Structure formats: structure tokens, C-alpha cells
Amino acid sequence: MRTSEILAALIGPTLLATAAMLLLNLGVMPAIVEELSRSPMLIVLAGYAAFVPGLAIVYFHNRWAFGWPLFITLIGWLSVIVGLIRMLFPLQLTGIVAGAASSPGLQAALFVVGVVFLIVGGVLSIKAYVRG
């Protein structure tokens, strides 16, 4: 269980910070996403930034038992998969991202992602930092 708590202590606040960034900057996110659509190299770097920590999480915490630690395992595998996709298909993703940047539903989708990150990050942070 200690590994779960350590990883939750890292992932929880990271998700909370990401949620805050998304929710506080919804108005400028279309411009940020549009900028990303012009940079395959940034997509590749984001792939490595997701793949390496995801691989570490999967290596140290590949636990499929029901309970809050399952969030950590799922985040690890999702990071590995998303990271690989970004590294292997950056040019294809620039087209997808360009379409998303001009989508009228982008802000609503990012709001939902922000709320999900807020909830999962909150749960993981509580499990890591609240004793008793």
C-alpha cells in the first residue's frame, strides 16, 4: 500500500494543478490547442512526458484489485498508451488537434476533463496526505 500512497502523493496534486490550469484558462485554451496543432515536435515531447512516468507507474504499481489504488494503475496504463500514440503519430495528431481547436465543443470538453481531474486528483491527494 505504501507504493500506492507515494504515487498518489505525486499524481493527486499534479491532477489538481492540471485541473486548475484547465478550469481557470478555458477562454485561452482554444489558442493553446491551436498552437499545439502547428508543432509535431511538441506532440512528440508530450508523448515522452507521458510515456516515461506511465511506464514507471506500471512497473511499480500494476495492481488490478478493486479500490482507489486501481486509479493509479489505470493512470499509468493510460499514460503509456497516450505517450506511445503521441510519439508514433505526431503528424496525424496535428490534424486531429487542429480540428479540435476549431471545434465549438472544445471548451465544454476541457471543462469536463478539468472536473474529472479535480475529482480524481482530490481523491488521490486525500488518500496520500490525510491520515486516519
Image: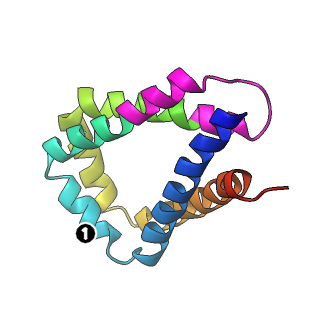
The residue depicted at 14 percent of the width and 42 percent of the height is 41
The residue depicted at 73 percent of the width and 51 percent of the height is 127
Amino acid under disc 1: Ala
Asked if residue 119 is among those painted magenta in the image, a careful observer would answer no
Q: Is residue 2 above or below residue 20?
A: above
Q: Is residue 10 above or below residue 56?
A: below
The residue depicted at 36 percent of the width and 61 percent of the height is 103
Q: Which color mode does the image show?
A: rainbow
Q: Is residue 7 above or below residue 116?
A: above
Quadrant hosting residue 107: bottom left
Residue 122 drawn at (x, y percent): 66, 60
Name the dominant secondary structure of the magenta segment: helix
Residue 100 drawn at (x, y percent): 33, 55
Residue sitting nearer the eye, 35 or 47: 47
Residue 5 drawn at (x, y percent): 66, 43
Question: Is residue 95 left or right of 118 when viewed as pictured?
Answer: left
The residue where tag 1 is placed is 31
Residue 89 drawn at (x, y percent): 24, 30
Question: Is residue 123 left or right of 72 when viewed as pictured?
Answer: right
In which quadrant of the rendered image does the C terminus lie?
bottom right
Residue sitting nearer the eye, 30 or 55: 55
Query: Which region of the structure is painted magenta?
Result: 52-74
Asked if residue 56 is among those painted magenta in the image, a careful observer would answer yes
Q: Is residue 58 above or below residue 8?
A: above
In which quadrant of the rendered image does the N terminus lie?
top right
Count of numbered circles on the image = 1
Element assignment for label 1: helix
The residue depicted at 45 percent of the width and 77 percent of the height is 24
Bin the neighbour count of mark 1 within 10 Å (Cα to Cα): few under 14, some 14-19, many 20 and up. few
